[in-house]
Amino acid sequence: MGSQQFESFLLANGLRVIVQPMAAVQSAALTLMLPGGSIYDEPGKFGTGAILAEMIPRGAGKFSARELSSEMDNLGLQRGVSGGVGYITISAATTADRLIDAIPLISTMLLKPHLAEDQFEPARELVHQGLNALEDEPKQRLGYFLRGCSYAAPWSNPAEGILEDIEAINLDDIKRHHQSLILPNEAVLGIAGNVDVAVIKDALNSAFGDWQQGELPELKTGGMDASPKHVQHDSTQTHIGIAWETVPYRHDRYFEAWATVSLLSGGMSSRLFTEVREKRGLCYAISASINTQRDQARVFGYAGTTNERAQETLDVMVAEIRRVHERITEAELQRCKARAKSTLIMQQESTMSRSSSLARDTLHLGRVMPMEELRSRIDALTVDQVREFAIEFAPKKMVLVTIGPEQLDPTSVSGDSVAI
Amino acid sequence: MQFYQHTLTNGLKIIAELNPSVYSVAAGFFVRTGSRDETADVSGVSHFLEHMAFKGNEKYSADDVNRIFDEIGANYNASTGEEVTMYYAAVLPEYLDTTLELLSVLMLPSLGQEDFDMEKNVILEEIGMYDDQPSFTAYDNIMATHFANHPLGQSILGTKESITALTAEQMRAYHADRYKAGNIILAVTGNTDFDELIKIVEKHCSNIPAGNCQRALPEVVAEPRLQLVTRDSSVQQHIMQMASAPKGTDDLRFAAELLSVVVGDDSGSRLFWDMVDPGFVDSAELSYNEYDGAGTWMTYLSCAPEDVETNLKRMQSVFDEVNRDGVTEEELEQAKNKVASRIVLRGERPMGRLSSLGGNWVYRKEYCSVADDLQTVRAVSLNDINALLKQFPVTMTTTVGVGPRETLSAE
């Protein structure tokens, strides 16, 4: 496995760029992360970021929506513009020789979108349709409610918006959003693939040189929804969501947090899978993973189970979570490490994956963590370290959200029944 | 990249596409069996068996199998379809031996009663999970309706009733019948040495019993059919439609793939511009699917329940126009650019090549490199598209709806 070489630089307008040349591949990918996620949606107008993301590709510069789409399709450009919680993300990939040609199209799309009157209604309607579709996906809906009970506003703002607010949003809101949030000095661009750094630099300066800096509006912290929360739904399964606080990616002890969650849910020999699914047959889908923002993070746990068994599933899940510090073996920790290292190395085969990591690392850490460093931090983890972390950061009270025909008894997630 | 092939004495076929400049190696067993090969009394057995394969043999327990896969940092999974059951893993090259040992354990599991009884619960949970997804219910139903009285219409998961009634003996009999070396392909992609690979495969896979399997390939009789499944708890209406299209050995399949991109890709297609872009629907797509001895056009539509008829009319007029006038040179060129890009990007990872490698052999006993696929795509002409439309017009025969609607008004 060769070591990576990447180059970081700043455009004059403050745009942070990281380029990782990869000689063994044919493709190249870029990930551009911009402020404009739902954390900037105003109360009463949740969905503004989502509509902006939907409108960006709908005509820009001298291109109509169809022309822009054709140009990109003819470059074989696989692409997406998606509104998230923290960021709007533009991702694109094609063969390396054509990515250079795609750059000016992407910059035009981003910096000179038409945001036209006749495109607004369709875009809003599409976001509306997406929200309706979500109503039929209980597992994803659960994520929305779980965030609402786990994060204070605006970090609980749903990326897709909410049905109640969609009609209240107008085109001026979208334009204002674009004007005030799409700023180069707050954005990051990661590029990975068979590219030449000098050529990329030139293309970027040319394409993004006119992008003006600015200052982001301040965010005001608000309230959080109460837990436990039950959402009535006539479904065959009860969907269970649990959440508790942990440390974000940029924290010194992140890898211990990661290892703790990995013990719970890192593979088919992990504790939740073994105890809830393998040994008791209580569910098909069960998992736990870290959701990290820049300055805060939660562990989100999920299980889907038939209604009659939901209480048992919840209680067994919580028991395993509370017991995670117990009987951690060297072998168990080795398995977590093996999976992580495998993933790290195999990620090197995907330009899309690499470009995304370059951007996200920079946003969270202010730099890209080289693979060697990542590997050694994982290797350095000891059983004692992980156990101490699991004890120190053990959840007392956990958030509980359920979607299904019947509420569950939340005793196990309350802070009372803990014995460490 | 270099292609190799070899057959073991028991008839197990090994095919490999190797590349020393990637970081991983991926291996998969492609068993030519699925829901279409089941009888009604064992509906769902192929999929349940796929789960049971991970429960180990005399040497390795279920815990051992899970643990060892995790020890080698494997990225692994399995899937069951109408015609193929796949078991695959991607690992760092130094773990190939252990990986093949584990994969071969999956081919010859004990299928013990205790594991069987416990895993039955998990299967029932999985059925429950899909039950809550109206788009999945639509898929299950469109296949059953379009392929009524045909093996391809048989449910992959089975039903609560058929799974509850299934016995371990029935599963063992099915396994003995279908998991024969002549019915299995081992496909390997990525960074390894072929001679080393053969030694490892001989070591671990020689005890897979020899033998071949039959498969009935009756003709599909496509009659106009409509079925509605009422789900009051669903907010959207989900509609799927189906029609006959080229089968898996038909040369027209490349034209079919490209036509489905022009007409119904999830972005930049005719359906996209006419229906998604203006915000009339959440989804409106057309895809082409190939099977053994059959092929389908399949549409998916999701929209507000009150807009179904209007949207079906919109889809119909898109299809009428294509059937009548074909597509333009620009549209075809654009579709080729999109598909070519997908082929290249997917082909960069061994995991990305594995299903193509295995699939091509299972369906056609053929090897196609990335370069071959790109050439074939580029070679499709408007004449091919017109020949395709003449033989397999985009005219839906079967319609299934899942959602609040109890009836659909006629045209």
Image (cartoon, coloured by chain):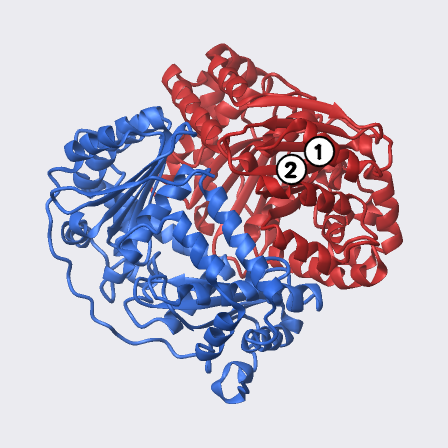
Q: Which color is chain A depicted in?
A: blue
Task: Give coordinates of residue B223: x percent, y percent.
Answer: 68, 31
* Placement of A366 over or under A272, stated as above or below: above
The reply to whether discs 1 and 2 touch (Cβ–Cβ < 8 Å) is: yes
* Residue plotted at (36% across, 65% down): A248
* SS for dot 1: strand
User: In the rendering, which numbered label is found on residue B27?
Assistant: 2
**Amino acid, disc 2:** Ala
Q: Which color is chain B depicted in?
A: red
User: Can residue B298 be seen?
Assistant: yes
Q: Which residue is mark 1?
A: B186
User: Can residue B295 be seen?
Assistant: no
User: In the rendering, which numbered label is found on residue B205?
Assistant: none
Q: Is residue A174 left or right of residue B64?
A: left
* Residue plotted at (28% across, 52% down): A367
* Placement of A380 over or under B263, stated as above or below: below
Task: Give coordinates of residue B228: x percent, y percent.
Answer: 61, 48
Task: Tell me the quarter of the picture where residue A363 sits.
Answer: bottom left
**Amino acid, disc 1:** Leu
